[in-house]
Image (cartoon, rainbow, N blue to C red):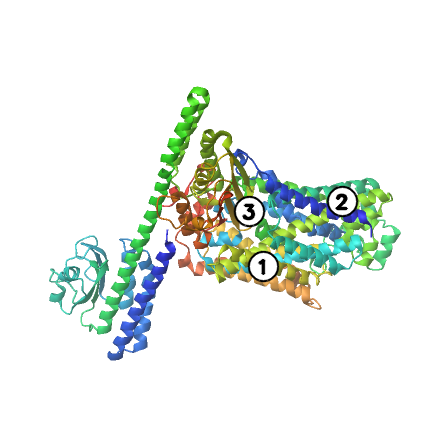
Amino acid sequence: MQTEWVVGAQVVVTALAAGIVLYLIVRRSRTVSEGREDAVSETLALVNRTLPYLRRGLSRRTAPELASAIHAYLTSSAVAIVSGREILAYIGAGSDHHQVGQEPLTSLARQVLLTGRPVVARTHEAVGCPRPACPLAAAVAAPLTMQGKAVGCLQVYLPFGQPLSASKVKMVTALAQLMSVEMELADLDAKTERLAKAELKVLQAQISPHFIYNTLNAIVAFVRTDPEQARQLLIDFADFLRLTFRRKRQFSPFAEELQYVHQYLSFEMARFGDRLRVVYRVAPEVLSTVVPVLVLQPLVENAVRHGISPKVGAGRVLIAAEDRGSECWVCVEDDGVGMEAEVAKVVLQRRDGVGVGLRSVNDRLRSVYGPEHGLEIWSQPAAGTRVTFSVPKFKPGVTV
Amino acid sequence: MNLVPFLGFAAIAVVTVAVGLYSTRIVRTTADVYVASRSVGPILNASAIAGEYLSAASFLGIAGMVMAFGYDVLWYPAGYAAGYLFLLLFVAAPLRRSGAYTIADFIEGRFGNPAFRLVVVSFVLVIGIFYLLPQMKGAGLTLQTLTGLPYWVGVVVVGGAMAVNVALGGMKGITFVQAFQFWVKAFAISVPTLVLLALFGSYADNWSLATAQPPPELRAAIEAGQAPGADWGTPFGPLSAQQGAPLLFTYSLMAATVFGTAGLPHILVRFYTNKDGRTARRTTLVVIAFIGSFYLFPSLLGLLGRVHAPDLYAAGRTDALLLELPGRIEDRTLALVLQAVTAAGAFAAFMSTTSGLLVAVAGGLAHDLYARTLAPQAPQRARIRAFRWAALIAGAVAIVLGLQVERFPINMLVGWAFAIAASAFFPLMVLAIWWRRLTATGAASGTLAGGGLATLAILYTMLASSPPGDPYVATLLAQPAIWTMPFALGTMIVVSLLRRDEVPADVGKKRVRLHVPESIGLRTEYITD
């Protein structure tokens, strides 16, 4: 859902942050004796080198890689990355007592976490390590913030005697800002994915209330007239429910979706009897195409519930899939009551209870394949509704 | 011009369209029919693959080339069939398990790197165009033989019609259509061959007539230098000795045809229709049986042609042998019927392959170049429009170039397409599937080096006014696969080893997906952590 928004935001924010870094360096190096071009290209090179690690979020696994990249680049004596009350990574001098997993020992770290502002220490005392033999003498520590709160810090210690230039301070501060932005984005990504998964779960549960009620009513009707049929329907229904709740995967072959729809329709047909006719027109070439799970059934359910059910007399649902070169084209069509073109246009935008199934299918199609692969709806009152979409036959990452 | 053979030609066009329409119009009131089988079975899909594979080169070209050059040419059909063995052993099942549709898809999935797509697509275009040329020649020649119209009319009419057809949405129900066309071709080559054998005497009799005691007309052609002499029936004959190094030529030809099959873009996409890797393997096995049986007939026809239609030597029209030979029997009615049958087969041959190739080339242009690279946000309507234009452009290129290749034997042109496929894609597919240390840089540079060198060597042979003097150099240029394929393989290995740190981190995961049999039931959720 809304991945394009996230990606857009990511691009903008990263560009902004890189721009800020550049600006700071440029402005700084006007006054500082260091060559301006050198400082700019150095910072860019550092950002360039650390960006791949930043992308993957900050964890015990990625932090050491990031720390050693910074360490190697700045020829510092030590680099530490702290998150909350824990050292995520520590590279360089003093690693005998500053250990990963421990609480940070230095008063410097505590000070940064408390104030949320960068701190510069020029002496051993200012660093504040309780070990007198600790080789750490001069340091820059900059906060890592999330939603305005300092949740960690980046510390760069310099070898004894090396001057702590203003451009180094700015560089570390800017790098910490960039890391903060990336952490927030990684968090957002994770949230988005969790949301998509949650939505799928909701969808799986969504089938139940209406449909269970209607199906049970249909079976009740059979209990007296045709007990054997009613028994068979109940067995099938139990199987169907188990299948529904067991479908934890994100993707499945189109053939499986078709089979699932077929099972679903067997109950609707028991309910509607002669009033519902279903026609399949499926090209065998697309049966093996991998599609998001539950991409077809909500469309069919919609056709039955909102197209055929309110209609007087019999109705027909067509489920079609065609082979179109590198894409697979899918269509669910009914000759039911239909709706006004303006209503059809906004169905996918509505945020109330109506059309949850359609919207979820649309959102998932767009987030998996891109915005140009969403649902297309055509409808006319008294003529019926047609919902179509097309998906590429192969997309990296979309596998069973 | 006689109307009957032309009717056979027209009938097959109409029936093909009808089969396509019928198969897409099939409607069912239950999903069971599809879901029970879940996919096209091995025999149907093998028919479709054979239908797409047996082009004008196999249907017309091999018989004509056997007649023109002798039994040396049998390496072509042997290699064309044996190529599927390599496909079966190394490529078919892992390719299917990867879920990829095209070669470019497969490579992107394997390396998670879309940049490499353009390299792959450029060779899809080169191979596709090279393969289209002989189909154009087949079309021109067939119409010329049947109606007496000039060569260019057939090329323009058939090429244009196929391009428009593909642009308008292509053949519907492609699997059924291709399978149907395979059986048309199998019927149209086997029945006339058996009838002609019955009329012209046994194979042994014809063999001695072709080699030891040539009939007067053939002897005249041999003496005039138009037809090869006694070396027609011996190994290392006129074909492989053309440049003066017959053994090298033969090995290089074998390399091209045997390795080329596993790199043909329009054939590999057909495996997507299989249900899983296991059925992909079974399909390939059936294809070998189908194609192997098919190739018995053109070689027999080449022999009959040498004895009974030697006038084609002088006219330089040996490629039209299959269309001409039925006319040499006494019974006029039977001759016309057989001509109608072979004309129908020829039409099926260039129709099925041409549309498959046009779809592959237009797909490469529209999907990989336009939709993936130039305009990634293009809406569906724009993508469809791009595909239509791409099909028309590909058709126009094929027609223009097809007009230039009248002097090359049909089958030799296809052999060259195989040499490029063998050099560009065979090493790529095999290493990407079987070697974990292959990197994207290594794969791309090997593909470019092998495919590029093979293309240049062949273009030089086609365009140069006189071949180089040294027989080995000339042979290596005319049949480059023997050195370009290993060169591509070596480049991939060396560059990959140099760029060791670029090996994708998830290569183990990818390889599990490619190689674990379906029966184990491994799913993504078990592979991902």
What residue do we see at 58% from left, 59% from top?
B390
Mark 1 belongs to chain: B
Q: Look at the numbered discs 2 and 3 and tell me whether their residues touch, using CB distance below 8 Å.
A: no
Q: Amino acid at mark 2?
A: Val
Mark 2 belongs to chain: B
In terms of image quadrants, where is residue B156? bottom right
Q: Amino acid at mark 3?
A: Asp
Q: Which residue is mark 2?
A: B341
Mark 3 belongs to chain: A
In terms of image quadrants, where is residue A35? bottom left
Specify whether B251 is left or right of A310: right
Residue B58 percent location from the top left of the image: 69, 49
What is the number of the mark on residue B390? 1
What residue do we see at 20% from left, 68% from top?
A159
Which of the two discs, 2 and 1, labels the residue nearer the N terminus?
A: 2
> Does A222 appear above or below B162?
above
Q: Amino acid at mark 1?
A: Ala
Specify whether B218 is left or right of A27: right
> Does B327 appear above or below A145?
above
Q: CA distance from mark 2 to mark 3?
A: 31 Å
Q: Secondary structure at mark 2?
A: helix
> Does B136 appear above or below A269?
below
- Quick one: A350 or B439, which is closer to the camera? A350
Query: Circle 3: is it few (<14), some (14-19), or many (20+) Cα within 10 Å?
Result: many
Specify whether A159 is left or right of B437: left
Q: Secondary structure at mark 1?
A: helix
In terms of image quadrants, where is residue A153? bottom left
Q: Which residue is mark 3?
A: A323
Residue A257 percent location from the top left of the image: 46, 39
